[in-house]
Amino acid sequence: LEFLEGAMPAIDAWMVWLLESQAGPTKGSFRWRGRPAHTDKLAANTLASGLDDFPRASQPSEDEYHVDLLSWMVKACRVVARVDAALRAEAGTVRYELSRDYSRLGDELLAGLEELHWDEGASSFHDVGLHSDDGVIVTEVVLRCAAPDGSTIDTSVPTELLETRRVPCPASHPRFLYPLGDGRGGYLMRERFIEKTRKVQHVRHLGYVSIFPFMLKLLDPASDKLGAVLDAVESPDQLWSSHGIRSLSAADPFYRRANAPGDAPYWRGAIWMNVNYLILGALHHYAREEGPQRARASKLYDLLRANLLQTVLGELGATGVLWEHYDDATGKGMRGHPFAGWTALVVAIMAEMFPA
């Protein structure tokens, strides 16, 4: 308690920085900073969110705001308010003053969550941004172009343009040099998203981002939104797999697609134990709260817990290590290993230990 009391001024300053620096274009909204406006990737990354290549608005802009960040801010306000209340109850008086009433602020932000991010047409929570909902993904040849000073950049064009030799290099690097090879005797190919109708709208990519209000237990147990979220979680065509909850719907155009040559899909279908732990904790919570989804949450909790334990412990037995994340189709470990980190949460899942 003494440490927490001493840390509260710094926590308050950090909260103020987040509230001000990540504020979105609409009152009560928040926007992750750092998305590049121009990129050679299939979609611009959102590294600040931690969900690097999860698809967001097709055109990064100051008009977008993100449902996961708003959910985190509501949760953060509630946590700071609880710690402050506990310190005051224990000590009677404290040696700090907070700059905000975080309990009230959390309630105010939560009140705007549905208005800002609930997409009635999709029955889901989504980001909002400058986005083309009718765009298409095309495959192009990667080629190299040069500037008068000798510098080069790589771009891509449809195969048919390369065959006609009418290659439209960028104005900054107008001279076509050659197509890049894939090391196997063919051209290096990459996918590109071609926008059609672009406007500010809900960004309909169903995945981890869409269920943050549920994962962080922000939804009322009686809310009809909770049932809609569980519909997506439970659907094998969307988020449910026999190995855990997918990071991106299997029906999404970006599902399991690489973001660039050599940049394998990361948050586009793979199963992540840190997020699945939050999902399992939310199911555990709603299975104990009175409401229309109580029995359903209990059933999904048991099924998901069994699937996660089988996946992680099965791969541990087969390979001897824990993995960064797991393939949603096979359950095989992927990327970083040995990776204790958040995958060590399997121990908490075994013990059924979840934060209140």
Image: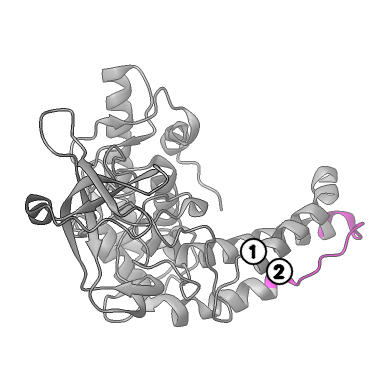
Task: Tell which residue pokes out farthest to the top in this image.
Answer: 320
Within the image, what quadrant is residue 122 found in?
bottom left
Residue 191 visible in the displayed image = yes
Nearer the observer, 56 or 315: 56
- Residue topped by disc 1: 78
Left or right of residue 70, residue 263 in this image: left
Main SS class of the magenta portion in the image: loop
- Specify the segment rendered in magenta: 89-103
The percent coordinates of residue 134 (x first, y second) are 20, 73
Q: Dot 1: what SS? A: helix
| CA distance for labels 1 and 2 | 7 Å
The percent coordinates of residue 110 (x first, y second) are 55, 74
- Amino acid type, label 2: Tyr
Residue 224 visible in the displayed image = no
- Residue topped by disc 2: 102
Nearer the observer, 173 or 51: 173
Left or right of residue 353, residue 137 in this image: left
Say whether residue 93 is magenta.
Answer: yes
Q: Is residue 89 above or below residue 190?
A: below
